[in-house]
């Protein structure tokens, strides 16, 4: 165990730094000269990049985020030999989420970390990732609303993990996976509710804004109006 702790701490630190690289923000700057913090939703994730520069860039961001979420746990399991320490290993992508949501390179602003969260699922159990993806697609097909469909997945996935057959898991027990799913969902919801700080809009009731953020992942009901904004975000820079 004495050698395990430094390995785990180093792995978690690397996972945080990998997550902290603001990929969508950098792509916005390099490809379109756009500061995502000042346009559309103000989020520095893939969805805002797609709304500003086009959906053709979204597959790239998704692929990068899935890799960032899955790579540290795979390195820990297969390169560092941490498979016997399931709890420590499964918690590795949590630090990737923390880096992505609160990046030191953006003064601790960041994205929602949904892709990174999904990448963590890929790394710890591809079958659980597929279950989450199917749940999302079914909810989206019924509602045509992405944020609400993701909320369904975040609410259901911890319970699905508890019921998942142990033989389908790479390491650990269902409770470990449920903990990762629940912690990741809470971090994403915290990011939805509090965004990257700053004052709430003054032209809407606080309760309306928080409900919109929780269910729609934006401050107002009208999605097109929200994405067309070019807000003054000098306090965030």
Image (spheres, rainbow, N blue to C red):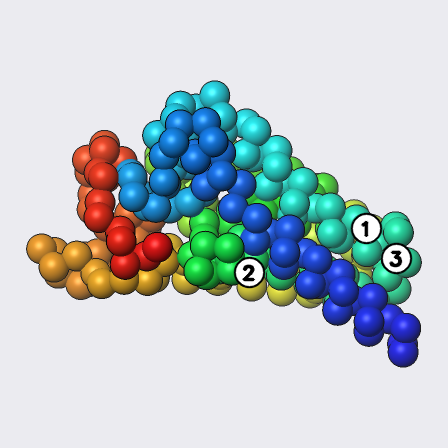
> Which class describes the residues within 10 Å of circle 3: few (<14), some (14-19), or many (20+)?
some
Disc number at residue 98?
2
Left or right: 228 as drawn, with respect to 15: left
From the viewer's perspective, is residue 3 above or below residue 54? Answer: below
From the viewer's perspective, is residue 195 above or below residue 38? Answer: below
- Are the two marked residues, 3 and 1, in contact with CB atoms closer than 8 angstroms? yes
Residue at 27 percent of width and 36 percent of height: 227
> Which class describes the residues within 10 Å of circle 2: few (<14), some (14-19), or many (20+)?
many
Occupied quadrant, residue 59: top right
Residue 164 in the image: x percent, y percent? 70, 52
Residue at 23 percent of width and 39 percent of height: 230
Pointer 1 residue: 75
**Mark 1: secondary structure:** helix
Where the C terminus falls, by quadrant? Answer: bottom left
Residue 195 in the image: x percent, y percent? 35, 57
Q: Which circle's residue, 3 or 1, is located before the other in the chain? A: 1
Q: Which circle's residue, 2 or 3, is located before the other in the chain? A: 3
- In the picture as drawn, the residue positioned furthest to the bottom comes out as 2
Residue at 21 percent of width and 56 percent of height: 209
Kindly tell me whether residue 165 is visible in this rendering. no
Occupied quadrant, residue 2: bottom right
Pointer 3 residue: 80
């Amino acid at each position: 165990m004495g050698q395990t702790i430094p390995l785990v701490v180093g792995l978690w630190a690397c996972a945080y730094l990998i997550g902290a690289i603001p990929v969508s923000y950098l792509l916005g700057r390099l490809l379109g000269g756009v500061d995502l913090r000042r346009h559309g939703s103000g989020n520095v994730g893939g969805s805002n990049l797609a709304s500003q520069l086009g959906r053709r860039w979204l597959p790239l961001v998704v692929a990068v985020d899935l890799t960032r979420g899955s790579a540290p746990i795979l390195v820990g399991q297969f390169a560092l030999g941490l498979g016997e320490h399931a709890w420590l290993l499964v918690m590795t992508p949590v630090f990737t989420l923390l880096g992505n949501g609160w990046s030191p390179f953006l003064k601790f602003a960041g994205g929602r970390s949904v892709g990174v969260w999904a990448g963590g699922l890929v790394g710890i159990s591809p079958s659980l990732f597929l279950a989450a993806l199917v749940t999302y697609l079914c909810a989206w097909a019924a509602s045509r609303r992405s944020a609400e469909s993701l909320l369904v997945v975040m609410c259901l996935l911890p319970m699905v993990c508890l019921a998942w057959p142990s033989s389908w898991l790479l390491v650990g027990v269902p409770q470990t996976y449920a903990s990762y799913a629940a912690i990741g969902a809470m971090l994403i919801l915290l990011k939805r509710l509090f965004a990257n700080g700053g004052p709430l809009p003054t032209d809407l009731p606080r309760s309306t804004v928080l409900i919109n953020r929780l269910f729609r992942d934006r401050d107002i009901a009208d999605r097109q109006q929200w994405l067309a904004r070019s807000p003054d975000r000098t306090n965030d820079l």
